[in-house]
Image: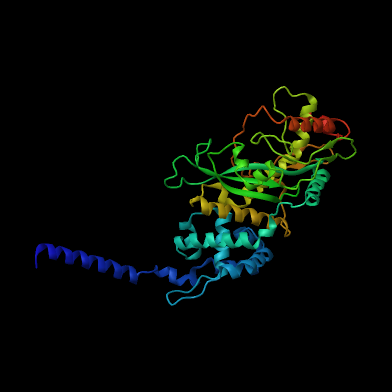
Amino acid sequence: MSAQDLAAAVVLLLVAKRKRKRTRCWSKDWYTKRQKYTHENLLKDLMLTEEADFKNFVRLDLEQFQELLELVTPLIEKKNTNMREAIPPFQRLSITLRYLATGNTLEDLKFHSAIAPQTISLIITETCDAIIHVLKEFIKLPQTAEEWERVAKDFESQWNAPHVIGAIDGKHVEIKKPPGSGSYYYNYKKTFSVVLMAVVNANYEFIMVDVGTNGRVSDGGVLQNTTFGKQLKNNALNIPPPALLPGSSRKLPYFFVGDDAFPMSQNLLKPYSQTRLTKEKRIYNYRISRARRMVESVFGILATRFGVFQRAFPFNPTKVRKIVLACCYLHNFLRKSRSFLSPSFMFREDNESGIIHPPSLEVFQLPQLKNINIKNSLNIAKQARDEYNEFCNNEGAVPWQEKMVS
């Protein structure tokens, strides 16, 4: 046998040896003992003895968890194979919720669950997909003028803000730089991110979410990249026509409230610039900001309840979108199923003085969108804002507003 033939034989032998090794070691030994080491054993004990600790582990109480498990089981249940036993839905849902609650690494989660990190990654994606599907009715944009009017009534009764049909804002959700993406996701904060855009109602609930615009688009262009933004621009949202303000002869449009990250339009108003403010304009800013703070509160609740927002997501943007959406749907699920909101999560208002107390410092805040400087807003938008300013300072005044801006 020639030296060349001998070398080729050695290579073939090594390749065959590696293949045999991979075949024999398809799983680590302790993974095969999952029933012994899994977190499911602990959780089942907590269900019976320590419900508060169970809720801390998954961020849902026992009744909410069982309801959600029943909904997603048909979508995440797997069959056993000859090679291995399938991971049951209970473990799939609970490890996904633990990831959303903590943002812990997959390497850390494998010691909770006795599941390989690669499998956990797949489980998280599949389970978040299932959560979005089964809870799809929990985030719904109003479709008719009557539905928008009901949203406006809540803002009027709870925040003295008639004709407001939603508070709108966007936040950067930090991600690890995707391979080969260059500066596409690089934002003004010098991190990499995708943008979470949202509209919320007066009850701390999302009515629209959009995730995935690259962080580099850090101005009003973010809104225009969303389906909602295009519908707003094209008057395709079935917003009610202008109507009389309560107790007034002024007829004004229904509108969303935003901040300086968005261009103003007839149906999107924002506060006056902080330069050269009159007392009347300060009162308007105070009044309109009472409604706009809803979206700030909701983002704070979301990011504090789900620790996954408190560190950079290690997944590609497609997976990040699914995870963020799942958190938003879970937020509304919890709001509508007896979930208590701690006062420390919210802007709280003193009923007698009107003083607004911001959330406590432990509430995690996501990075803001970059403000834009647009001086040439539509005249019709400026006129609507000025007219609302007049309303807030005259027939629509509340007793404590001058005290709040003095």
- Residue extending farthest to the bottom is 82
- The colouring scheme, among rainbow, by chain, secondary structure or one colour, is rainbow
Residue 70 seen by the camera: yes
Is 129 rendered above or below residue 156?
below
Query: Total number of numbered labels?
Result: 0
Tell me residue 319's x, y (percent): 52, 54
Tell me residue 199's x, y (percent): 69, 46
Q: Is residue 16 left or right of residue 123?
A: left
Is 101 rendered above or below residue 256?
below
Q: Nearer the viewer, residue 404 or 7?
A: 7
Where, by quadrant of the figure, is residue 269 drawn?
top right
Tell me residue 247's x, y (percent): 90, 38
Q: Determine the residue positioned at 15% across, 63% down.
A: 7
Quarter of the picture holding the N terminus: bottom left
Where, by quadrant of the figure, is residue 73 drawn?
bottom right
Q: Nearer the viewer, residue 361 or 371?
A: 371
Q: Determine the residue positioned at 51% across, 68% down.
A: 38
- Residue extending farthest to the left is 2
Q: Is residue 352 left or right of residue 29?
A: right
Quarter of the picture holding the C terminus: top right
Q: Nearer the viewer, residue 377 or 116?
A: 377
